[in-house]
Amino acid sequence: MIAETVCSAVSAAGLGIAIVTAYRKRYLAAVRIAAYSLVPIGLVMTGVVEWLADTAFSPTAWAGFGLLGLAWVLFMTTRAVERRRGGTRKERRAAAREAGRSDAVAPAAAAPALGQGTRPATRPAPASRGDDDFSDIEAILKKHGI
C-alpha cells in the first residue's frame, strides 16, 4: 500500500515538472519527462510493484535466493576443481588407459625447418675476457674525462 502511494506521488511530481517544462516552451523535453513519470503508475496498475513488495518481504523468497546462490557457488567450485585437475572424469580415465598401454610409440622428431647452411657461422669467443672488461672500463672513464 505504501509502495503504491509513493509511486503515485512520484508520477504526480513528474507530471508537474513536465507541465512546467512545457510552459517554458521545451515541448520535446516535457513529453520525455511525462513519459518517464507515467512508468511508476503503470507498474502499480500492472501489479509489478505488489509482486516486488511481496517478494522483498517474504522469508521464503529470500531463502530461495539463498539456495540459488549456494547452488551457483557449488557449481563454480566444481568447475574450478575440474579445470585444475585437467578435464572431466571421462577424459582422465581415457588418459589413464592410454598411459597404461605398452605399445604406445613416441612420435618421431620432426626435421628442422631451416637447413644447417643457412645460418652464418658464429665466431669463437676470445680466449681472455679480462682484456675486454678493462677496455670497456677504460672507455667509460675516458668518456667521463677521468
Image (spheres, grey):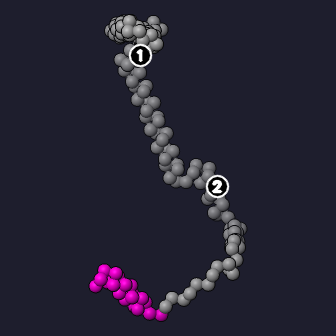
- Which quadrant of the view contains residue 99? bottom right
Horizontal and vertical percent position of residue 21: 38, 10
Q: Is residue 77 visible?
A: yes
Residue at (42, 88) in percent of width and height: 132
Q: Pick whichever, 111 or 130, lies toward us.
A: 130
Horizontal and vertical percent position of residue 27: 45, 10
- Which quadrant of the view contains residue 124? bottom right
Q: Which mark is residue 52?
A: 1
Residue at (62, 57) in percent of width and height: 95
Above/below status of 129 relative to 109: below
Q: Is residue 44 visible?
A: no
Q: Main secondary structure of the magenta part?
A: helix
Residue at (33, 84) in percent of width and height: 142
**Residue type at the position of mark 2:** Ala
Numbered disc 2: secondary structure: helix
For marks 1 and 2, give the one nearer the viewer. 1
Residue 139 painted magenta: yes
Residue 79 painted magenta: no
Horizontal and vertical percent position of residue 80: 49, 47
Q: Which mark is residue 94?
A: 2
Above/below status of 53 relative to 94: above
Q: Pick whichever, 90 or 19, lies toward us.
A: 19
Above/below status of 91 relative to 31: below
Q: Is residue 69 left or right of residue 141?
A: right
Residues in magenta, as a range: 127-146
